[in-house]
Amino acid sequence: MTTQEKEQICSIAAMLFAPPDAMLVDDLEQESFHRLLAKCFLKWGRDSEMASPFIRGWDRDSFLGALQSEYERLFTDMDGVRISLVESTYKPWTLDKDCGMVFAASKGLVMGDWAAHLLDIYERLSLEIPEDFRSTPDHLVLELEFLSLLHQSAPKEWISTFVEDHLDWIPELKKEMDKAGSSPFYKNAVEFVQLFLEHETSDGKVNDHGKKRIC
Amino acid sequence: MEKPGKTKMKPIKISRRTFLKGSGLAAGALSMGVFDFTSWSRTSMEGPVTRIPTICNGCGNRCAIFAYVKNKRIWRIEGNPEANGNQGVICPKGHGYVHDLYNPNRIRSPLKRVGTKFQAISWEQAYKEISQKINLILMDNGPESIFWVNYPMPNHGYALRLMHSLTSPHYFTHGSTCFTARNAAWNFTVGKLPANDLVNSKYIMIMGRNPAGGIDLGQVKDIVKAKEKGAKVIVVDPRHSETAILADEWLPIKPGTDLAFLLAMINVMVEEKLYEKEFIENHTVGFPQLEDEIINYPPVWAEKICEIPAKTIVRIAREMAMQKPRALIHRGYHGAFGAQYLNSFQTARALAIANSLLGNINREGGIYFSESANLGELQPTHPAPAGPSSSKADGTGIPGRYPLGSYGDGITHAIPELALRGILKCGFVYHHNPLRTNPNPKRVIAGYKKLDLMVVIDPVLSETASIAHYVLPASFYLEADDAVDTKHSGKQAQVTIQQKAIEPVFDTRSAFQIITDLGKHLGVGRYFNFTLDEANALRLKPFGVSLESLKAKGVLPVGPQWKEGFVKADTPSGKVEIASAVLNELGYPAVPRWEAPLVSPDDKDPHSFRLIHGKQAYHTHAMTANQPYLMAISRRYDMIRLWINRARAEKLGLKDGDVVQMKSMIGEGKIRVKLTEGLHPSCVWLPSGYGNFSKYLTTAYDQGLSYNDFLPTLFDPAVGHAMASEVIVQVKKA
């Protein structure tokens, strides 16, 4: 897979996990998009048909409406299952043993160490994050976009370091999404991300539940 | 199907916006030491720590604390030793409540109800739509149709200013469900609510109040210090409370009969001339009327009612008199007579009079008038609005309605009734959750739902927020500056300040900003043309202390030290009013008389109990049950249970931990029981703070029961308080 393809795949993945809108549907209309996804799934040992949920099978408005409903149900709606797309919530809030807060080692909170780390990186690189993400600089969308930037110009070592440090929670996200009975679109989207990370970015190093293992 | 990968792909166009804005990765901008998480983490732990003095919001005590911040995140909190109220310590709620700061389920932006769901909207849209709707409602229904209700916070003066700017009289606190009977009684007797000089007392009697459970850290420390100096502590409470654990003696009084106990104590003091004669002669009015009335209440009479042996009442009256004036009966709070019974006002009056007989008013070791910090006015720099021209629709302060009710607090649980009658049409609920803290939730829901517009200002989707038309997310207290306050005043007045320790995590705003923003959008911005710093500086002006010095310390003593000695009461006579001419004129007894509770359990029915309630040291109202660490304490010690007297429970065939069905005239529910000798047999006791039913409060949801689920909507005929223990329940094995 070329560097340019990897960069593009990261952007596509970020797009898939952003709140669905008309622009997403426009982008999904492109045949080349499906070809790339099908090619990837095949390359990673899966059926190319896994790309089919990304093809609009019915009218545009209904397709977008269904995506929005499912996104809300899974990730944003306060009445929904509220699966977190934020890295910090999957990890202890801080590793600082001197932190005196009762929740220091708790999971499930935002703005943990990993978020603070990314904020520091973004600041040093003069990367601005939008207001919507002020409390979640470690949101999956931003992390995938950042990974795309890394593929653009960073050394391979940095890419694998970033994936190991900041995208090792994807298997847990996938479990949560499976448990919630995600629609094929989001089920395959998270699998797409996981497969990409496993096969294309971390030199065969795969993480599971925060415990690193070597394949 | 064509094999993927065999065809040369067209480049994919990604038309949607990118989220990370910037020019890409600049070479050399980062070292691996920063980019690698482990290295960065190690370095960041060495970061500087900043200490910001502020005020806790885990409950209404507003303990003074220091918030420590490292790398722009909260890192530790500890008590500020300068504050009278908490004397350097913090309770579990103070630690546990901070969890909400980084809770992803907090409200992240203003919400608007659309159908059955909430939609995130911008602040500008929220303000615009809310103000347009309010203006239309006020145009059709008049300024009296809007209200504001809150649990009092330092900024509540600005909420009152907002209502007065709109010429509405309808500002409410939670008081009628908490303390208004107690306050009214003290006001009618000595002119104001006094404090307890526990630390210097030699004999402390506490009736119903439980500072070790409904936690008041300063008071607990003072009780312990007093005991170390040899003081005797008596707790009169149907339940062996957390404070009873500290006491020398626990008197398990029959609930609702504290008045009988007090009248009998007074009887002993009067009959045996144990009272402080000089004080009675020079500083009180109405003692002869008391002498006439009190002969009706000998201890043998009281024993039959309150079930405390007559000889115990006599002994305690004598023991207290021996130590006078360094003997006190705690001024009370919610429990026993704050807002509990039909006789609560008379009970608190009797308690105030019993203290007066001990001659302990404004004496060392007795009941004293704490030094108050009278904050400066905003005017003339910022003129105050003219205010309302009509009286409150709840009838507080109005003869024939609730003449003894607190106009300032209003009758909060009357809001749903006023809404159902179409008098109130729209309102704001701030830092308050009436759907959970008011009696009879079905009625409360019906009332609040009847409003044309309800705006809730809260950090989380509480029960009340869940049914609002709009929800404005208030910043967490560690994210917001606030008005200066005087909460910690004692023997010297103290001013305190809540300061922002970190930037808001989500798109939230401080309550002060929300109030002033609302004022501006509602067309009364001329009354809100000041910054918080300007206002705070004006508030501090009378004391000659700067805002900067207060910000640096968090707590500052101001004004003179308290001086012992009774000079003058803030009553019509200028004296302690044992008999009140005003009460007499209003048609109430001038001196306390026995008055039975409104309802009583059926002695012949083994399933009939009075339902009473109280706090545990790790929960406050309805706002802490959603904190995982505090709920973990509840579960670890199996505290979400209904207390029931062991002997009575066994007669019902109940074993410890059994599930019972509890039913009142308005509600029912199931809960496990705790069998105990530490509870009067006539009642069951339910810990407050549970029974949340907002599905958005994922930790608290469906945990335990709330006493409000069983309590009908009641209004004491004089004060208007909720009479929150006037409820009989049937308890049966489920």
Image: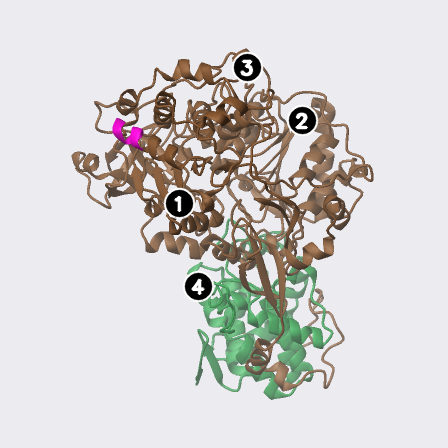
Residue A128, position as x, y percentages in the image? 72, 68
Q: CA distance from mark 1 to mark 3?
A: 50 Å
- The tag on residue B581 is 3
Q: CA distance from mark 1 to mark 4?
A: 26 Å
- Identify the secondary structure beneath mark 1: loop
- The tag on residue B169 is 2
- For the residues bearing labels 4 and 3, Cβ distance under 8 angstroms: no
- The tag on residue A178 is 4
Is residue B43 rendered to the left or right of residue B136? left
Q: Colour of chain B?
A: brown
Mark 1 vs mark 4: tell me if same chain: no
Depth order, front residue of A124/A70: A124
| In this view, the mark in front (4 or 2) | 2
Q: Quick check: A183 above or below B216?
A: below
Q: Is residue B521 magenta?
A: no
- Identify the secondary structure beneath mark 2: loop
Asked if residue B695 can be seen in this view, the reply is: no
| In this view, the mark in front (2 or 1) | 2
**Chain represented in green:** A
Q: Split into 4 quadrants, where in the image is the C terminus of chain B?
A: top left
For disc 4, the neighbor class at 10 Å (few under 14, some 14 to 19, many from 20) is: some
Q: CA distance from mark 4 to mark 2?
A: 55 Å
According to the picture, the residue beneath numbered tag 1 turns out to be B702
Residue B426, position as x, y percentages in the image? 64, 30
What chain does mark 1 sit on? B
